[in-house]
Every structure is written in C-alpha cells, then in structure tokens.
Amino acid sequence: MIVTVLLAEAIVPGNTNCLQVIAAIHAIRSPSSVLGLRFSFSRLPGGNFRHDDTAPSSGAATPRAGAAASSATTNTIVFHMQSARSKDRARRREAQTHGDAAPGRVDACQFGTRARRPGYNRRQVKPALPVGVRRALWGATWAITTVLASFAAMRLVWHDGLWLFMLGNGLTPYLYLPVWPIAAAATAARRKRLAVLAGLVAALHGYWTITPLLPRTAAATTGRTLRIVSANLLMVHDNPPLLAAELDRLDADVYFLQELSPHWDDELERRGFWRRYPFNKRLTSEDSFGTAIASRLPVRDLDVFWSAELPQMRGVLRVDDRDIALLNVHLLPPRSLDYVPYYRQGADDLVVMVKQLGANSFIVAGDFNSTPDSRFVARMRGLSDDAWEAAGSGFGFTWPNGMFTLPPMRLDHVFVSPDLGVLRATLGVGLGSDHRPIIADVARRMR
C-alpha cells in the first residue's frame, strides 16, 4: 500500500502533530499489506491538519494531481491506496470518509497503539537475529571457508607438502563438508564473494571425492583370472581363528599378508594354510611389521627387502607363461611428525621400484597407510591402476573397521600394471582386525 499525505497550512502545536496523523492512518492500514506503509509527506503553507469531507471517488485524481490543485486556504489529507482487491479499496475509502474520526482536526488519535492486520499474531513473528550475532556468524563462515580454501590450494600447489596438510588430505571426504551449506547460505543471502569462494571449494571437493566413485567400463580380459587378497592381520588380534577362517573362505590364488606375528604364523600353520599355499615366504615379528606372500601358483625369487628401515617383500609370479612381479608393502603411518620422514622415504622407494619395472606386469598390494587423496596414491595412479577405483563400488573404506572412533578411510590398496585388467574388487569383513581385507580379481587385458 502507498499512502500519500499532504500536510496543509500552519501546524498548531499541542493540538495535532504528525505522529497523530500516522497513528490514524495505521488504523486503516491494508489487510493485504506485507511490508507495511510507506509515507510521502508534502508540506503546504497554512492551516491545521484536517480530513477532507469529500472522499476521493474511483475516478479521482492521483495524490500528485491533488497536491497540485490544492490552494493555500484548503486543508487536505489525501489518501491514495492501491490494493489487489477492489472491495478492500472501497472499504478503506469508506472508512476514511465515514469512519470514527470526525471531519476536522485529527485529535482523537492516541499515539503508541498500533493497528494490526487481521490474523496477525505477534508471537508467531520471529525477530531477526541481533546485528552482532549475525556479524559473528558470517565472520565464522568466512573463517571456515578461508581455512578450507587454504587446504585446497595447498593440495593443488604443494600436495602433502606439510604434515598438517597431509592430515587434511587424508580427511578429504569429511574436511570440506562445511563449505556446502556455507555456499548455499551465502547464495541465498546474496553475499557474492563468500558464495563464489565456498562454491569453488565445494566444486573441488566434489571432484576429488565423487569422481573416483563414478562407474567405469569393465576391462576386456583374457587368460586365467587371479584372485588377489591383501589383509592386515592385526598383530595383537585376540581371536585369530575368526579371521583365519575368513581367509580360507576367500580362496585366493595369492595372499599379501601384513602384521604377521608368531602367534598368527602358528595359527595358520595349525590350519594347514601354508601347506595349501606352498609358494610362500614369511617374516614374523613381535611388532606390526611382519609380512608374508603365499601363493598356490609358482612364485620365484621370494625375498625380503628393506625400505625406510622396514621390511617389505617381493617375488615373481608365473601365470600363463607370463611373469608378474609381486610387491607386498606396509608403510609406516604418518600420524606424527617423527613418522613422516620414514613414510615419505618408504613411499618414494616404492614409486622408484615401480618405475624400474617399466612395461613389465606387476601387482603391488598391502597396507599403505595412505588414503586415495594422498600424494603417494596420486603418483601410483600415474603408473598403475587402482583396483578399487577400476572395479569397486563406493568408498571402499578399510580402516578402522569399527575398532576406533575415527572416520573411516581406505588405507589398503591393490595396484596393477596397465596391461592387467580388474574384473571385480570387493572388501572382506576382517573380523577382529582394524583393517578389512581387499579382494581383487585380475586377468590379462586383451590387446
């Protein structure tokens, strides 16, 4: 509604004032008004505030024309109202002409009583947050978005360059989640700079997290299919028979085992596991870095090599008159600044070894303590295919398997050379271990 008030000649102090006029106008405000009234005041010389005795007809001139026609001896208050419903407009004009207010001076108004629209309930109206609270909230969203944008930028220009950013990259599926509601809220509030920054970070998060989940075309393969199982046994497993029975059910051709302790070795010996997989090499340890490769197919040159002061294992598998190099890896987790140099050295050594294999076939599996968002896995993608990303479904989280109250991650991987195709990749249960086994069915690609 638009109300135009023409204030006539001289105001008489103490009798009538603008606030009284406004209070009177509030009494007839439009029921369909949403934002309230807007007032346009024009002062004419002389006179008191009075209602004009004659209401404007439907064909009456506009307030602008009425103001032009006013004279110094005419005291007029002209109301021009626009409503979606003509009957409301007629009723308001009737109230203006024949209402409770008598013609003449508007002296019956009482300031401070505000008329309300029909159906108006003051308790249902939620007041806006105080300015200070709103500023604090937007400041917090800016701070969060800036920090996350810094992590994203560091990943682009210096991947895993610092330990803090390395940890952030490991938490990529979770770390950037706040930017999605921030981008939506900033867009709704028309805060363009914040919306653009949060939107860019959200786009990167989607690319890093969702792209690996997209389905891929299954590889066309030929020859014998190999089932590969990589399992971290957990050196302190308190019930080895549970996991050992699961390994038997998986019926793999080649097992890559990590954290092989003496009691685990005894358990597998008792179950006849080593006899069923006679091509094996075992290194037991009282710490978390025992290792083994066990195969039912011929494997030669099985030996232990050391990288970053940790034992790793390798061998050469013979399948269909073709050699496939095997590497069983367990890297030190970069969970503290003291561990980071060993982790980096082990990862670098492994990348060098894979590069030296050149065009030869290979399968590299194990507990890499590296998420898909780490720099190490990114480098391995350039040299091989990640079995889970090639034929798995979902995120493929392997750790902590319910053992710790930490967000799940995929730390275990199977990498295969480009000449090998992955037909299927799944996860085992890993009863009693903090890692779930990863299973991959692999065969030679058709040329």
Image: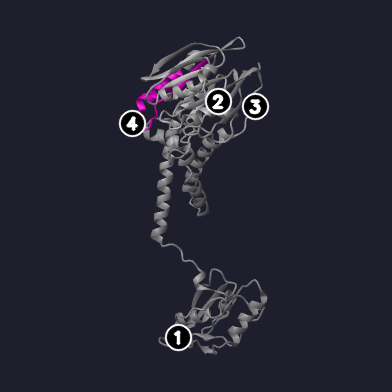
* C-alpha gap between disc 1 and disc 2: 98 Å
Seen from the viewer's position, the closer of residues 222 and 117 is: 222
Residue 103, percent from left and from top: 55, 89
Query: What element does badge 2 sit on?
Result: helix
Where is 122 relative to 225, above or below? below
Which of the pair 5/181 is nearer the observer? 181
Classify mark 1: helix, strand or loop.
Answer: loop
Which of the 4 image quarters holds residue 350? Answer: top left
Check disc 1 and give the amino acid type. Thr
Viewport quadrant of the C terminus: top right
Numbered mark located on residue 337 in the image: 4
Q: Which residue is mark 3?
A: 218
Residue 248, disc: 2
Span of residues in magenta: 325-352
Which residue of the protein is positioned furthest toward the front in this rendering?
Answer: 270
First along the sequence among labels 2 and 4:
2
**Residue shown at 50% from the left, 22% from the top:** 256
Q: Name the residue tied to disc 1.
A: 16
- The percent position of residue 261, horizontal first and vertical second, equals 41, 24
